[in-house]
Amino acid sequence: MTAFQSPHAPLHILLVEDNPDDAYLTREAFESLEPTPTFSVCSDGVDAMDYLHRQLSDQQALPDIVLMDLNMPRMDGFGLLEHLKRDPALRALPVLVFSTSNAREDVRRAYEAYANSYICKPRLFSEYEDVVQAVRTFWLRTASLPS
């Protein structure tokens, strides 16, 4: 995507989520957007880094946004943030933490690790849709994404 993404270009989201139910709810909530975003889904930080390195080695496009949980097996969200921000080819990727935790320490640690935003997962599907609209408004209409 270009820095000035067309409102008609679908957003490509890398969803890093170990809970299949949360992954399903997140994808369903994004279905309401026009155009509907495309998703690549990884179950933890190790899978996400493998996916991103494959994209780079195959000269494929990187996702526009990484939407990730914090609490995952093998490599948690904090570890993934550390790896992303240490890699020159990946550090510009916008990373949105999407977690059930609203602990101040988790929020602080995520921002210290250069997360671009921290969103607490809603409990109701209607709240998921509200969060998706907020993400869309900011990341597609207000912010300029790196190319």
Image (cartoon, rainbow, N blue to C red):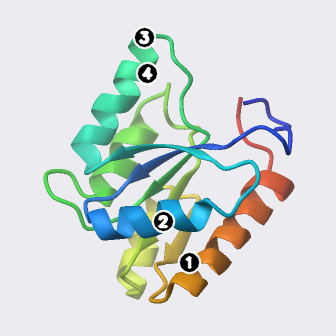
Q: Which residue is label 2 attached to?
A: 26
Where is residue 10 drawn, in percent x and y? 70, 41
The tag on residue 55 is 4
Where is residue 37 drawn, in percent x and y? 63, 47
- Contact between marks 2 and 1 (CB within 8 A): the answer is yes
Where is residue 36 drawn, in percent x and y? 67, 50
Question: Which residue type carries mark 2?
Answer: Thr
State whether residue 103 is above or below residue 81: below
The tag on residue 45 is none
- N-terminal of the pair, mark 2 or mark 4, is 2
Secondary structure of residue under mark 1: helix
Sort mark 1 into few (<14), some (14-19) or many (20+) by Cα contacts within 10 Å.
some
- N-terminal of the pair, mark 2 or mark 1, is 2
Secondary structure of residue under mark 2: helix
- N-terminal of the pair, mark 3 or mark 1, is 3
Question: Which residue type carries mark 4?
Answer: Gln
Question: Which residue type carries mark 3?
Answer: Asp
Q: CA distance from mark 3 to mark 1?
A: 34 Å
Q: Is residue 63 left or right of residue 138?
A: left
Where is residue 62 drawn, in percent x and y? 54, 29
Q: Which residue is label 1 attached to?
A: 128
State whether residue 101 is above or below residue 65: below
Question: Which residue type carries mark 1?
Answer: Tyr
